[in-house]
Amino acid sequence: MRYLLTILLSFLLIGASIEDARKANQAYEDGNYKEAISLYKKAIDANPKNAKLYFNLANAQSKAGKPQEAIRTFEQYKTMTDNPKERAKADYNIGNVLTDTKKWDRAVDYYKKSLRYMSNDSDAKHNYELAQKKEREQDKNKKNNKNQQNKQQQNKDKKQQQQNKQNQDQQNKQQQNKQNQQNQQQQDQQKKQQQPQKVSKAEAEKILKALEQKEKDLLQQFKKKETESSKSKNEKDW
């Protein structure tokens, strides 16, 4: 990736602002981007209508690892100039900032806008084509990842369905076993109730004696009735 982060210095500054701008440029060249940002902001406070200070500030913010701030400042710079080529430079630099964060689709858009007024710029063409390639690769990777995720989810769902079926089968089996046990218990209980109860020898003798005694009592009652009936027939009817 080729970069074009041009420092623009306007010497139409007054008072301390020109000194701050020079110090900011020097800090930028020395790689001290945080100090450069501070000095550019100080120069802007002294001369807020100088668009080139915003351009340089955005470059420093980009180098300092503050891409969102850099993009906002570049956009602000674009509102402060009517020169199409100057705006194209800002769009190109925004494209570079976006490539640093691998936002290839947006980078392509900004490179395309910059090429409207920088059609002969080899760096802009190179970066535009490279961003397009990266965007296609990114889209392909996203699609592959999506397909992989879908496949993994399908496998997960299939395993879950199998597990659910196994659990259901196990529950059904346990329920059936429980029902079978209950049925067996009921059958055993019914058989037990139908079987004649065993009587001990002592109980049997007791029952037998009771039956014999009852038979004797019935026999005596029968004889008594016959005797009474016989007496009744032998009596005279006066």
Image: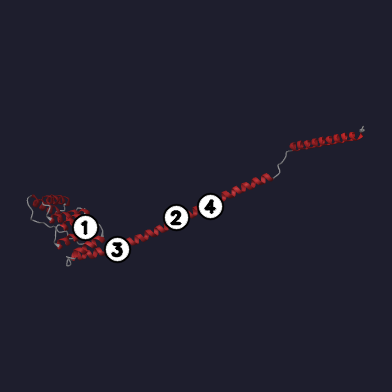
Name the residue that disc number 3 marks. Answer: 137
Left or right of residue 121, residue 227 in this image: right
Number of marks in the image? 4
Q: Is mark 1 on a helix, strand or loop?
A: helix
C-alpha distance separating marks 3 and 2 = 34 Å
Q: In this view, does 113 lie above or below 47?
A: below
Mark positioned earlier in the residue sequence (1 or 3): 1
Q: Looking at the picture, how far across and down is residue 151, in whole percent?
A: 39, 60
Name which residue type carries label 4. Answer: Asn
The residue depicted at 20 percent of the width and 59 percent of the height is: 94
Taking the view exactly as shown, the residue that stands out farthest to the top is 238
Identify the colour scheme used.
secondary structure
- Three-letter amino acid code at disc 1? Val
- Mark 1 near mark 3, Cβ–Cβ under 8 Å? no
Under mark 2, the amino acid is Gln
Instruction: Name the image quarter holding residue 56.
Output: bottom left
Report, in whole angstroms, how far the alpha carbon at label 4 lies from the one at label 1: 63 Å
Disc 1 target residue: 97
Residue marked by disc 2: 160
- Counting residues from the start of the chain, the first of labels 4 and 1 encountered is 1
Q: What element carries label 4?
A: helix
On the image, the x and y values in percent for residue 21 come to 11, 52
Residue 115 location, x and y as percent?
19, 65
Classify residue 198 as left or right of residue 7.
right
**Which residue is denoted by mark 4 in the rendering?**
172
Question: Rounded to the nearest whole Å, what is the CA distance between mark 2 and mark 1?
Answer: 45 Å
Query: What separation in Å lies between label 4 and label 3 (alpha carbons)?
Result: 52 Å
Amino acid identity at mark 3: Glu
Q: Mark 2 falls on what kind of element? A: helix
Give coordinates of residue 197: x percent, y percent: 70, 42
